[in-house]
């Protein structure tokens, strides 16, 4: 007779503790639900969404406004500079011997590796600056930046966005051209880079 009431009292105590636990959980759930549905939270979410949309539109409009214009870098060439070739270290002035050679003429010497490096860097030049720099590097009207041709081509093919590039032609060598593709510079370029590399970065985590 003494044992049975003791068991019943323990059962009552267990039920009471469970009920208290359930009440705490229900109270916490109610609080969290009210917090998540708070007007302040909704306002902040709306603010951040509007901010992201504004940034996207600003970047997009800036990219469209450029209309494949190139940024002027303000490069000032050194006057009277001359690099004396060294037979033991021909890298800065070595000629391209395989795969990239130009047809040599009486007035045109074989292109050097530095020539291709210069044309790659000149993809960042503006149209006005490009003309001056090309004439100083290769000689007067030896290489032409076909900026207007590329601009018209991109408008005709509706490819004004995305990759920016230049086309160089050589009046003394008809039918020959070099395409120089610009790297990341504008805001939209960096957004595209982030989109391309974000997946690979997350996979490495």
Image: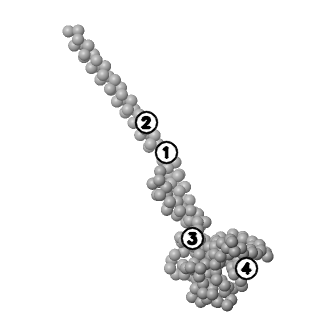
Q: Secondary structure at mark 1?
A: helix
- Name the residue carrying label 2: 31
- Neighbor class of circle 1 (other Cα within 10 Å; few <14, some 14-19, many 20+) is few
Relative vertical location of residue 25 with respect to residue 77 in this rendering, above or below: above
Of residues 102 and 68, the one nearer the viewer is 102
Quadrant that contains the N terminus = top left
Q: Using the image, tell me which numbered label, if any, was put on residue 136.
A: 4
Q: Identify the residue at image location x=63%, y=73%.
A: 117
Q: Identify the residue at image location x=49%, y=62%.
A: 196
Disc 4 and disc 2: Cα gap in Å? 73 Å
Disc 4 and disc 3: Cα gap in Å? 32 Å
Where is residue 61, by image quadrant? bottom right
Of tags 3 and 1, the one toward the viewer is 3
- Name the residue carrying label 1: 41
Of residues 49 and 147, the one nearer the viewer is 147
Disc 2 and disc 1: Cα gap in Å? 14 Å
């Amino acid at each position: 007779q003494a044992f049975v009431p003791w068991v019943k009292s323990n059962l009552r105590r267990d039920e009471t503790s469970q009920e208290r636990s359930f009440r705490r959980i229900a109270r916490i759930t109610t609080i969290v639900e009210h917090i998540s549905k708070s007007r302040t939270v909704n306002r902040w979410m709306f603010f951040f969404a509007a901010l992201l949309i504004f940034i996207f539109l600003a970047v997009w409009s800036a990219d469209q406004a450029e209309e494949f214009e190139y940024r002027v870098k303000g490069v000032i060439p050194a006057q009277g500079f001359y690099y004396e070739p060294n037979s033991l270290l021909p890298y800065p002035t070595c000629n391209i011997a395989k795969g990239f050679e130009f047809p040599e003429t009486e007035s045109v010497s074989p292109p050097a590796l530095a020539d291709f490096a210069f044309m790659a860097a000149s993809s960042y030049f503006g149209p006005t600056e490009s003309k001056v720099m090309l004439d100083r590097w290769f000689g007067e009207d030896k290489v032409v930046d076909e900026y207007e041709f590329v601009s018209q081509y991109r408008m005709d093919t509706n490819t004004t966005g995305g990759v920016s590039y230049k086309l160089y032609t050589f009046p003394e060598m008809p039918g020959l051209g070099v395409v120089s593709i610009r790297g990341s510079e504008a805001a939209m370029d960096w957004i595209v880079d982030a989109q391309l590399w974000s997946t690979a970065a997350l996979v490495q985590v």
